[in-house]
Image: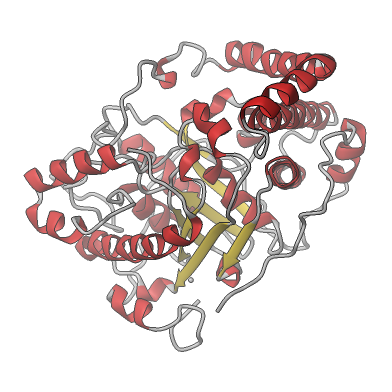
Amino acid sequence: MRTARPDTSTMPVRGSTSTRELVSRLTSERPCVGETVARPVRSSTSATPRTTPNAHLQHAVTLDPHDDAAGRGADSAVAQDVHAPTTLGGPGPGAPTLRLGCDCRSVSTVDLGELPVIGHVPRRRLVTVPGVAMIAGGLAATVPVWLPSAIAYDLLRAPRRMPWTRVLSFSLVWSGLETVGVGASAALWALGMSGRPDPHYGLQRWWATRLVDGLRLVCDLDIEVEGADALSPGPIVMCVRHASHPDALLPAWLLADGPGMRPRYVLKREMLLDPSLDVVGNRVPNHFIDRGAEDSGPELEALEELGRGMGRRDAAVIFPEGTFARDATRRRALAWIAERDPERASRVSALRHLLPPRGGGTAALLRGSPDADVVLMAHVGLERLSRLVDAPGAVPFADPVRVRLWRWRRAEVPEGDDFLPWLDDAWLLLDDWVDRQLPRSGARHGA
């Protein structure tokens, strides 16, 4: 079943909305009568798992997940050893210590997670908030300089695409939205509303929607979604393909655009360098994961806590691959698994575009929310933006970004040792869909 999204291609980018108007709109939002308002995760406690009937993935794949007979459908993630058993019931006595490893991470010269400012909130915000405001102010003040220069350069080098004009224009949109978002969150704090999640969810929805509007207007972004009815009602645990920086925005936009769901993200802690995400993200339930931690126990407990208390409007969002799916990273991951778990290696060796999923984080979220269904999300069209330096070569978008969602009822999701094989099979389903879509979109994979 193909579900068309509302056409908002003509919507204006309202990055110029004043902070006063935005705060007025946000503070008017109220939770529904009798609705449980979740708080950000502060501590972790052990959960009592609920046993549900096991069912093999093939049952959900053979039938349409949206049919009544079949059910409904930072890189960031807990980076456990991919060969270690993953259970929904939690580790038992003598279970191997899981680590937040680097086996599938691409190597970079600078690990942002190791920067001293990351873990120090005042110091971090003293750097990031003024920094982004200066970028926004500088770009706005120098529009008469950089805009004609970029246009002249693009007319000489790429007149049909005008890439640098688009990239610089969207940089102004992004930095402006960041500045307004931080200003609105400061106003909510001044009004004594920093502990109220609903105005911050409203701010998050506004921010995500305006960013997508900006990409539509400046970069010709078009998004086609199939299976959008899988997103509601909650609670759901949403497992998303991770191919580039912008794809972390897609779940927030999808959950906001129609169902009005409240996402709880699992994000790498480097994302705290984004000031709006830092301030607002720490006032609503999210978890910024330390992918370099030696002991994953506290991280898994935090994710289990993050899953608790989810209701009909809540969705936990996680990226089980743990990093961008590049060809070289996939080869290393598959070789690593083959050395330690030949049986699993034979299962996931058919992956052509996705990385083998890591099951620890998803399992922890499901332990925390024993009633949550599982939604899988694949997409194509953003692969060329896995590195920000490649943005000028990727815009404008020549083809639509295509999104596909599947939903499984919780009773159809196995537990214990059967969970990771189920997730592997589900990931093969996503990989097969991506493979069929790529020739249509013309998207390319980064090597």
Above or below residue 147? Residue 199 is: below
Whether residue 118 is visible: yes
Tally the marks: 0
Q: Position of residue 349 (x, y in %)?
A: 18, 55
Q: Position of residue 271 (x, y in %)?
A: 53, 29
Above or below residue 81? Residue 251 is: below
Q: Is residue 256 left or right of residue 15?
A: left
Query: Which residue is at a point 15% across and 56% down the rendered structure image?
Result: 344
Q: Position of residue 406 (x, y in %)?
A: 47, 69
Q: Position of residue 359 (x, y in %)?
A: 30, 52
Query: Which residue is at a point 73% across and 29% down the rendered structure image?
Result: 169
Colouring of the image: secondary structure
Above or below residue 219? Residue 102 is: above
Whether residue 95 is visible: no
Query: Which residue is at a point 52% across and 35% down the rendered structure image?
Result: 42
Camera-side residue of 167 and 314: 167
Above or below residue 223? Residue 243 is: above
Camera-side residue of 209 and 4: 4
Q: Is residue 230 left or right of residue 58?
A: right
Q: Which of the 4 image quarters holds residue 194?
A: top right
